[in-house]
Image (cartoon, rainbow, N blue to C red):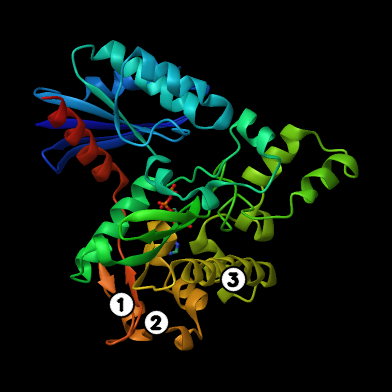
Amino acid sequence: MRTLVLNSGSSSVKFRLYDGDRVVDRGTVERIGEPGDAPKDHEAALAQIMAGLDLGGLAAVGHRVVHGGLRFAEPTLINDEVVAGIRGLVPLAPLHNPGNLAGIEVARRLLPDVPQVAVFDTAFHRTLPPEAATYAIDADVARRHNIYRFGFHGTSHAYVSRRTARLLGRDLADTNTITLHLGNGASACAVEGGRSVATSMGLSPLEGLVMGTRSGDLDPAIVFHLRRTAGMGVDEIDDLLNQHSGLVGLCGVNDMREVLARRADGDGAAALAFAVYCRRIRSYVGSYYALLGRLDAITFTAGVGENAAEVRAAALDGLERLGIAVDAGRNTSGSGERVVSPDGSPVAVCVVPTDEEGEIAEQTRGVVAARG
Ligand code: ADP
C-alpha cells in the first residue's frame, strides 16, 4: 500500500512517498509563486511533483495541517465539510493553514479517487486539561474569539514520546516524559502516560521557547509599548516577533550551527543568544517536572535537539539534585535513538530523531484502514 505525505507551506511543498512504512521517494519544491522558473502556484507545484512519482497503487494521501482548532482531535478523512472546517481556522493560523489548504484542494482535484486524510499539529494536545488550555483573560472574550492554548508539533511530540518509552523498555501508559522539539520552530511538551498535559506553544506557534526567528515568551505589554511608543503597526510587530526575533534577532543568524561556531570564536552576541535559548529550555523543564510530579525521561528531538550536544548539556547542567544528568561522553557520541544520561539516573535523558512524515503516513494508513 502506497501513501503520499504532503506538507504544503505558503511557498513550498515537501513530499514523501511510502510503500508500507518504507520511504520510496522524497523531495521539496520551493519558491512557489516567485519569479524565475519556480512553479507559479500550488497547482503547478503538485502537478510537477506527481508527474515525477510512480503513484501506481496509491491508497491514500496524508496532509499535514497546522491548526485543527478545538474541533479536530484525530486524523480526519477529508471531505468538503472538513475543508470548510480547516478554512474556518485560517484566522487562528494565517501563516500556515492557507498553504495546507491549497495542497489539499489541489491534491483532491488531481487525485479525485484517492482518500485524503488531514493530520493536525494541534490534535495531540487536545488532551490538555482545561487549566492548561485556558489563558487567564476575560472568559467571554476568550470564548468569542477562540483564545485557548492549542499547542503545535503534536505529531512530533506524540511520536517521540512513544519511541522514548520503547527505547527505555517501559510501558507508555506508565511513562512521564518531557519532549523538547528544537528545530527552526521549537516547543516543549509534558507527556503523562502518552497524553499531552502541558505544551509551550499556545494560540499560535509564537509562544514558549526561543526559536530560530521567533521570540517565544514575552511580556504582552511589549506589544503595546511597540505600538504606542515605537509607533509600529500590528503587522510590523507580528513580523518582528515571528521573523526577526529569537536567535536571529539576538545575534543575526537563525541556524544553531552558526550560533555555536560564532560563540566558539568569542562572539558576545552569539554567546548571549545561546545562553537565553538554553535558559528558556531549562525553565520549561523545571516547570513541567513540577506539573508532572514524577519524571521518567527528557527527550531531545529535531535539528537542534538531535545534533547540538552543547545545547543539551547547557540546558540540563547542574540538575543532579533533581535526578537529571547528562553523561559528557555519551552526549557527544553516537547517533540515532539513544540514552545520554549516566546508567542508573532517575531521569533518563534521551535523543530520539523525530519522524513527522512517517507518523503522518502511519496515521493516514490507520484512518483509511478503519474506513474499510
Ligand atoms: P524544521 O523545524 O524546519 O523542521 P529542523 O528540525 O530540520 O527544522 O531543524 C533545523 C535547525 O536545526 C537548523 O536551523 C539548525 O539550527 C539546527 N541544526 C541542524 N543540524 C545541526 C547541528 N549539527 N548542530 C546544531 N544545530 C543543527
Mark 2, secondary structure of its residue: loop
Give residue 99's position: percent from left, percent from top. 46, 26
User: Dot 2: within a 10 Å radius of its alpha carbon, few (fewer than 14), some, or many (20 or more) residues?
Assistant: many
- How far apart marks 1 and 3 lie (CA) works out to 24 Å
Q: Is residue 38 visible?
A: no
Q: Which residue is mark 3?
A: 279
Most foreground residue, 288 or 4: 288
Q: Quadrant of the N terminus?
A: top left
Most foreground residue, 187 or 306: 187
- How far apart marks 1 and 2 lie (CA) works out to 12 Å
Mark 1, secondary structure of its residue: loop
For the point 51% across and 21% down, the residue is 88
Most foreground residue, 62 or 46: 62
For the point 49% across and 54% down, the residue is 186
Q: Which residue is mark 1?
A: 333
For the point 33% across and 85% down, the residue is 345
The three-letter code of the residue at mark 3 reads: Arg
- How far apart marks 3 and 2 lie (CA) works out to 16 Å
156 over 360 or under it: above or below = below
Picture quadrant where residue 341 is located = bottom left
Give residue 4's position: percent from left, percent from top. 22, 30
User: Dot 1: within a 10 Å radius of its alpha carbon, few (fewer than 14), some, or many (20 or more) residues?
Assistant: few
The three-letter code of the residue at mark 2 reads: Val
The three-letter code of the residue at mark 1 reads: Ser
Marking on residue 326 = 2
Give residue 226's position: percent from left, percent from top. 83, 45
Q: Earlier in the sequence, mark 3 or mark 2?
A: 3
